[in-house]
Amino acid sequence: MRYSFDQYDAHGFLKAPIFVWLGWIFLARSWVVFAMAGVSRDSGSKILAMVYPDSSTLYLGLSIGIPSLLLMWLMGLRHPDRGWVNQIMQHGRAMTLILCGIQLAQSMYHVYLEHGVFNWANALTITLLSWFIIYLLNGRWVKDCFQVPHLEHSEPQPSKN
């Protein structure tokens, strides 16, 4: 047995590691900023202008964050009777890798637009995305948590008499 019992949920699915959840939150960070701007009413537009001076970057970040939010939601909905959720979640690791690649390309494009001038935000984003991609590719727990277990049903087997 590779994992302990507390690493499985009530339905027999392996829970996602905390670093996958943190990675999904990092991929959906535009939604966090957008929600903070919405809550702070008067200074909301100032916050958005400060964090995202170009509105197209905000819209791209929001669109990239939607699949991450969807994967977080569907991870909690996994159940043996929900085949459609399980089929989507089987591709969750690949979808997350694609999202990371898109955000990494976007960050590299920002570095290109700044002519290679060092920026802490870009450096931190590129580093975190690179680490998350490596973790998604090499982590055994990550690979296993997106697999659908073969659950045995308690239906009686026909006798061979």
Image (cartoon, rainbow, N blue to C red):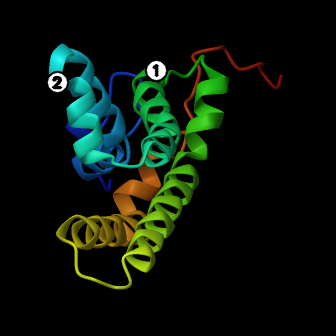
The x, y position of residue 96, in whole percent, is 49, 52
Nearer the observer, disc 1 or disc 2?
2
Q: Tell me the amino acid under the disc marked 2.
A: Ser
Q: Is residue 55 left or right of residue 37?
A: right
The quadrant where residue 28 appears: top left
| Residue position for label 2 | 43
- Using the rendered image of the protein, determine whether residue 40 is visible from the camera's viewpoint: no
The residue lying furthest to the bottom in this view is: 116
The residue lying furthest to the right in this view is: 161
- Using the rendered image of the protein, determine whether residue 1 is visible from the camera's viewpoint: yes
Out of 71 and 158, give the one closest to the viewer: 71
The x, y position of residue 87, in whole percent, is 65, 35
Q: Residue at x 39, y 24 (%)?
A: 76
The x, y position of residue 22, in whole percent, is 25, 46
| On screen, residue 58 above or below 157 | below
Quarter of the figure with the C terminus: top right
| On screen, residue 9 above or below 98 | above
Q: If you read the primary sequence from the N terminus, does the residue marked by circle 1 or circle 2 appear first?
A: 2
Q: Is residue 50 left or right of residue 23?
A: left
- Asked whether the beta carbons under mark 1 and mark 2 sit within 8 Å of each other, the answer is no
- Under circle 1, the secondary element is helix
Q: Residue at x 17, y 16 (%)?
A: 42
Out of 56 and 84, give the one closest to the viewer: 56
The x, y position of residue 2, in whole percent, is 32, 56
Say the numbered circle drawn on residue 77: 1
Q: Is residue 64 left or right of residue 157?
A: left
Q: Residue at x 22, y 73 (%)?
A: 119
